[in-house]
Image: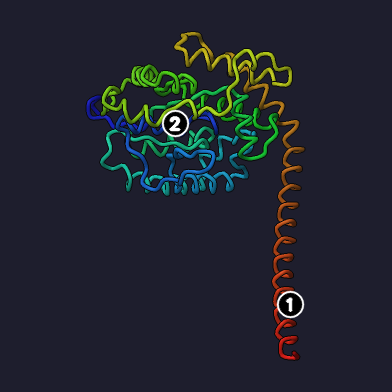
Amino acid sequence: MAESSKRHALVVAGMHRSGTSATTRVLNLLGADLPRELMSASGVNASGLWESSELIELHNAFLAAVESDWADHSAIAKSRFNSDTAKQYQAKILGILRRDFSESRLFVLKDPRICRLIPLWLAILDKFEVEPCFVIPIRNPLEVAVSLRKRNGFVPARSLLLWLRHVIDAERETRSYKRSFISYETLVDDWVGTVTKIAGDLQIQWPIRPEDAKNRVDEFLSAELRHHVFSHRDFGARADISDWVKRTYKALVLSSQGSKSNIFPEIDAVRDEFDKAAIAFDPIVSACRARLVDLNAGRAQLRNELKSRNLKIEQLQSALAKTESNVD
């Protein structure tokens, strides 16, 4: 396919609460097409999520099929992506892409789950005959942890491990492809510089020039998008943050700043240590998660029983009131 005739898929592969929604919307305002069925805005993302509700449903279903979910810090075995189950989900997702983007020269996809599903997506995009280009937003892990505590009630230690799993998987699986690491902080403070960097890293041109999109992007982006702000000094001074997280964040920040330093050895070392530790601790974590699922199911059952009994009490009270009225 000639360079001028290439179609490009911009895949925003960032951890939850890392600015993926803001990044996706900015790329859309520069001319990248969005999926047809978008998630509705929420309280934690009042300005919009900009991701496909259909793809999220399929991602969740695939994760469940391989005995995982979005909040799992464990690696997904490579063999899972070559299974018949993976092929079934590839076909379903490919159908959505053909419906939404058959005429698109440039489109953008976003769902933080993609960080852990990149092998699945590479096969899909190859069949769709588009060139994958990855945009990887990086945000201070402390800000991510505070945001996830507010949204999901996660303790910081869990959120930091989830951050680590998402970013090391995204980094490792995209090495052979065009990609651009960006800082969420810099996107908010200097979006023009950020999108210029992205275009240079990915060797693409925006259908809409930044100067022509300025008013709409400025209106969309504001400092209010950063509700939780920590400095690099805050992050480095925390003794309760794993060295794995600190080393990985430092390497990724350097990449987002345009450093030519080779981050592969550091990321690989962290990944190897993390995966080895997971072998020891995953059975304990899995048992705790299974117990939590059972407790939540029991709580839901008790809630339904209480609702049923309250309804019965209301019916009895109504019948009693009616009887007393007839007696009077």
Residue 12 point in image, percent of width and height? 44, 31
Position of 32 compared to 171: left or right? left
Image quarter where the C terminus lies is bottom right
Q: Which tag is nearer the camera, tag 1 or tag 2?
A: 1
Q: Nearer the viewer, residue 281 or 153?
A: 153
- Mark 1 and mark 2 lie on one chain; the one further toward the N terminus is 2
- Please tell me which residue is depicted at 45% across the width and 23% down the height of the picture: 188
- Please tell me which residue is depicted at 56% across the width and 38% down the height of the picture: 79
**Residue lying farthest bottom?**
327
Image quarter where the N terminus lies is top left
Q: Disc 1 to disc 2, how far (Cα)? A: 53 Å
Query: Could you classify mark 2 by the number of other residues whose Cα lies within 10 Å: few (under 14), some (14-19), or many (20 or more)?
Result: many
Q: Nearer the viewer, residue 319 or 254?
A: 319
Q: Nearer the viewer, residue 185 or 110?
A: 185
Q: Nearer the viewer, residue 261 or 277?
A: 261
**Residue lying farthest front?**
328
Position of 176 compared to 149: left or right? left
Residue 294 point in image, percent of width and height? 74, 52
Mark number for residue 22?
A: 2
Q: Which residue was labeled with disc 1?
A: 317
- Please tell me which residue is depicted at 52% across the width and 39% down the height of the picture: 81
Residue type pointed to by label 2: Ala
Residue 209 point in image, percent of width and height? 26, 24
Q: Compared with residue 25, is residue 230 higher up or lower down, i.e. above or below?
A: above
Query: Could you classify mark 1 by the number of other residues whose Cα lies within 10 Å: few (under 14), some (14-19), or many (20 or more)?
Result: few
> Disc 1, disc 2: CB below 8 Å?
no
SS category of the residue bearing label 1: helix
Residue type pointed to by label 1: Gln
SS category of the residue bearing label 2: helix
Residue 80 point in image, percent of width and height? 56, 40
Position of 89 compared to 7: left or right? right
